[in-house]
Image: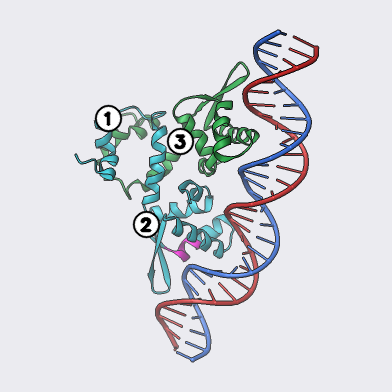
Chain colours: A cyan, B green, C blue, D red
Amino acid sequence: MHAFDVLGDPVRRRLLELLADGERPAGDLAGIVCTEFAISQAAVSQHLKVLREAGFATPRKEGPRRIYSVEPGRFEEVDDWLDRFRHFWEPRLDALATEVARGKKARRKDTGA
Amino acid sequence: MHAFDVLGDPVRRRLLELLADGERPAGDLAGIVCTEFAISQAAVSQHLKVLREAGFATPRKEGPRRIYSVEPGRFEEVDDWLDRFRHFWEPRLDALATEVARGKKARRKDTGA
DNA sequence: CTTTCATTTAAGTTTTGACTTAATAAGTTC
DNA sequence: GAACTTATTAAGTCAAAACTTAAATGAAAG
């Protein structure tokens, strides 16, 4: 499932926003999102399943609860897709500055420098 | 319409990818996307409408054709949303380096420095 | 080992939105 | 202005996906 297909849902985006500040148990997430969107707790669990299976979040079992936390990989993928549009609004830095500043390609592809 | 709702469609993403390299007439875009996705030209036009109305692309009339080009605003919005997740995968630069490197908040909010 | 709490899964319904065909609009060319 | 091109809009169909209720799972507590 493409990263943007997952993010193309307001409930899932909200869940991720909540997780951005740190891990949270599923029930906690449901408590917030159910009232905000007026949907059932089961619906939230289904969205969590999508996030799980798409690799946006992972649960950790702690007694009877599942503590969810953000999984960065797919976000990075989104960021990469955005790269091809960055020149439309970001000032063009010289190539080295960009590499150093964002430090992305170097780390990811390990070009051997 | 939320930026991610717009990007949550593979045809629209493809259209934007094509526009990332530079402006193109609608017919040109349709020619490519219709074959790639096996959909009608009208369907592509409908997607272009969504992109137009959401502010992701703007057409410029040139004779009978509409030359589409990227409108950066909404992409920047997406980038901003991602900001809250960046710390999960980007090395934390010191604050000034971040400002200089990305030059975003400074330019946008013009904090007066 | 049964009850209870937290969460997920299953089954079925409803809604959203993407697609098709047909019609319309606007710009050239003759 | 008739014919042809380029593109958008309208109307209706269909499928994907989000939601609901109900049942199932699994851990802890009595």
Say which of B23 and C6 sits in front. B23
Q: Name the quadrant containing residue B29.
A: top right
Magenta portion: prevailing SS class:
helix
Q: Which mark is residue B75?
A: 3
Instruction: Looking at the image, tell me whether mark 2 or mark 1 is earlier in sequence order.
Output: 2
Closer to the eye: label 2 or 1: 1
Badge 2 amino acid: Gly
Can you identify the residue that label 1 sits on? A95
Write the start and end of the magenta stretch as one range. A25-30
Letter of the chain that mark 1 sits on in the rendering: A
Q: Position of residue B80 (x, y in %)?
A: 41, 40
| Element at label 2 | loop
Badge 3 amino acid: Phe
- Name which residue lies at 38% across and 36% down: A83
Around disc 1, counting alpha carbons within 10 Å, would you say few (fewer than 14), some (14 to 19), or many (20 or more)?
few
Q: Same chain, marks 1 and 3?
A: no
Q: Same chain, marks 3 and 2?
A: no
